[in-house]
Amino acid sequence: MVEEISARKEKVLKAIIQEHILTAEPVGSRTLARKYDFDFSPATIRNEMADLEEMGFLEQPHTSAGRIPSDLGYRFYVDRLMEDELEKPVSLKRYLKELSRQKSGVEDIMSGMARMLSRMVQYTAIVSEPGFSESKISRLELLPVSSRKLLLIVITSSGLVNDKIIQLEKKLTEEELENLNRILSRRLAGRKVSTITGAFLQDLEEELKRRLNYAAEIIKRLEQEITDILDKQEMKIYLDGTSYILEQPEFNDIQSLKKILKVLDREEELRRLVAGQEDELEVKIGTENKLQEMQNCSLVVATYRLQGGGTGRVGVIGPTRMEYPRVISSVDLTAELISKIISSSGR
Amino acid sequence: MVEEISARKEKVLKAIIQEHILTAEPVGSRTLARKYDFDFSPATIRNEMADLEEMGFLEQPHTSAGRIPSDLGYRFYVDRLMEDELEKPVSLKRYLKELSRQKSGVEDIMSGMARMLSRMVQYTAIVSEPGFSESKISRLELLPVSSRKLLLIVITSSGLVNDKIIQLEKKLTEEELENLNRILSRRLAGRKVSTITGAFLQDLEEELKRRLNYAAEIIKRLEQEITDILDKQEMKIYLDGTSYILEQPEFNDIQSLKKILKVLDREEELRRLVAGQEDELEVKIGTENKLQEMQNCSLVVATYRLQGGGTGRVGVIGPTRMEYPRVISSVDLTAELISKIISSSGR
DNA sequence: GTTAGCACTCTACCTTATTGAGTGCTAAAG
DNA sequence: CTTTAGCACTCAATAAGGTAGAGTGCTAAC
């Protein structure tokens, strides 16, 4: 890969990849010469192709077919050849305005963004809900719902809301509840979720025991529920545009189609797929992906960060033969949009 | 359909349908005679088949193939022939316990039930979130989140929670907020959502204006947001087990597969698909379904009702050649389970 | 009314032939 | 030394023919 590669080879490689992305067919020297007017002949192209194949950038489905890019070829394309194709797409503002108006909860925003992204790129889009752990708690409250049922609500400074209904053995009086809320509020508000761990919890438990005279088990239970809701690692995954996969000619045979759709049907797999803390945009091409079933797919994922803390991931799943420039720009844009929308509705 | 049909014809029809459900192949007189030991010969079966075809219960893909059931045939099977196959499946209690323990929010329950159902029947399952309109409001609260941002929370007596962040131009003092909450609570708590309409809202607005001295627009805005959250018709749809469709031999050709998966990718379509107020379990077979793209699918849907009011739908989508007895029992069971779980976690 | 027998039908599948896009190599030209 | 024209060769994809087998409908006998 560190090998030198002549300008002409780059030109040929780029043309092959672009052509293949367009047509999904192996591209031959003749076609290439016809469509792109190079100042050298098909024969020369053939020679270059042979070289590029030896270097690992191209592959030949069979002797008498054209060449298709290898994963390595795409990698080279993404890393070195496509920069000038990247377009900063249209104004964010239009989207921003439109979306932030109608949508209310974080959920709606997430699914809306997944939908928008998939429509934009015409591939499957995936968005993971922001995790709590890096957010600061803005408010935590226990509301009575019925005699022995409380609603535990946590709101983060970035505007995320999470709630859970908990059931207690004992009924709490209004006063008891008020006390409890006061203490919890004082101790937890403004705190980063990830700092709420062992020692701190111990301490909190002490205080609760000291200042309230409930049975120890109730306190234990409450604490359990609170850590539960804060820990919640299984952030929801929003998927949209699954059917775009069906349009891709490489998935015209049932076998590969099945493989992929099965993966998309399993939330845990998806979660693992987009997991990662990389700050910059990642592109996983074909076999770079660990998941066997997805090895003729590519994945473009970015991280979004909310102002109040908390991060999530946005991505696109498509065939290795993906329109990388367009997809990368769009994913980037979407990540930015998500931060902006949530932060603006949350300021 | 009102036509008399001999006991022997019923026997043959039932056998054909069961055999076809099992094998997905056209069934011929020979095979049938071999597998089921009737006290009459293949030739007789052929005669009966010819009759049944004329009556519209069977179809012949081509002259030299066996018969397959028509939609009408399945309909007759579902209505008249399969009763004795219906099994009340295993104890609910086991599921109930398992599910209600881990799951917390309504969301988790819904997606959990969709997953369970699809695993049970090995087809695609669909669950729609309960609508608000028939529920009673148990609690409605505005919580301050940041300077000009409030969290509006509505909890129904059946345990549903819905929240929305709203942004105001003016900052409310703690006291103002408390007043507001008191009035809203008094007026709305215990009320059925569907009764909150024109006149009542007018009245509420009057009271707010009289008792609080905010700008009229803020009151207007609040009211807007409240009706917004209560009206929310677009209840979420949970889908699980999409990939089971891939296992069905009738969808081994890309064309039909595409058609269906495209439908499943559109939430609005799904919503329309399961919509309906029928109280008993509905079975829509093939062309009985209005949606063109789904005309070689069947749909089994039931309604579930929460104790505090509020209803939603549970269903299964599969090929017309579906194991109706098993599916019907399971959908029925699931509907029952959903009511029980939510009601128990919500009591 | 029921059944055995038989000719007939039609798909699924296998085999073979043909076509054409594309290659690699060689040798000539720049 | 690089580029290019020419040409023989390869191989998937398509078409065409040929066979097998499951199944039917009809007729005639029971």
Image: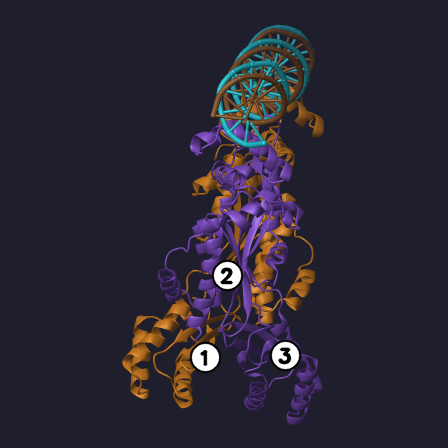
Chain colours: A purple, B orange, C brown, D cyan
Q: CA distance from mark 2 to mark 1?
A: 22 Å
Pointers 1 and 3 in contact (C-beta within 8 Å): no
Disc 1: which residue = B141
Q: Quadrant of residue B336?
A: bottom right
Q: Which mark is residue B129?
A: 2
Query: Identity of the amino acid at label 2?
Result: Glu
Q: Nearer the viewer, mark 2 or mark 3?
A: 3
Q: CA distance from mark 2 to mark 3?
A: 35 Å
Mark 1 nearby-residue class (10 Å; few <14, some 14–19, many ≥20) = many
Please tell me whether residue A201 is drawn above or below residue A45 in the rendered image: below
Please tell me whether residue B144 is drawn above or below residue B289 in the rendered image: below
Q: Identify which residue is drawn at 70% across, 85% down.
A: A202
Residue A309: where, in percent of width, then height? 53, 73
Q: Which mark is residue A195?
A: 3
Residue B45: where, in percent of width, then height? 62, 24
Q: CA distance from mark 1 to mark 3?
A: 29 Å
Mark 2 nearby-residue class (10 Å; few <14, some 14–19, many ≥20) = many
Farthest residue, direction bottom: A211
Q: Quadrant of residue B65?
A: top right
- In the rendered view of the protein, which quadrant contains the C terminus of chain B? bottom right
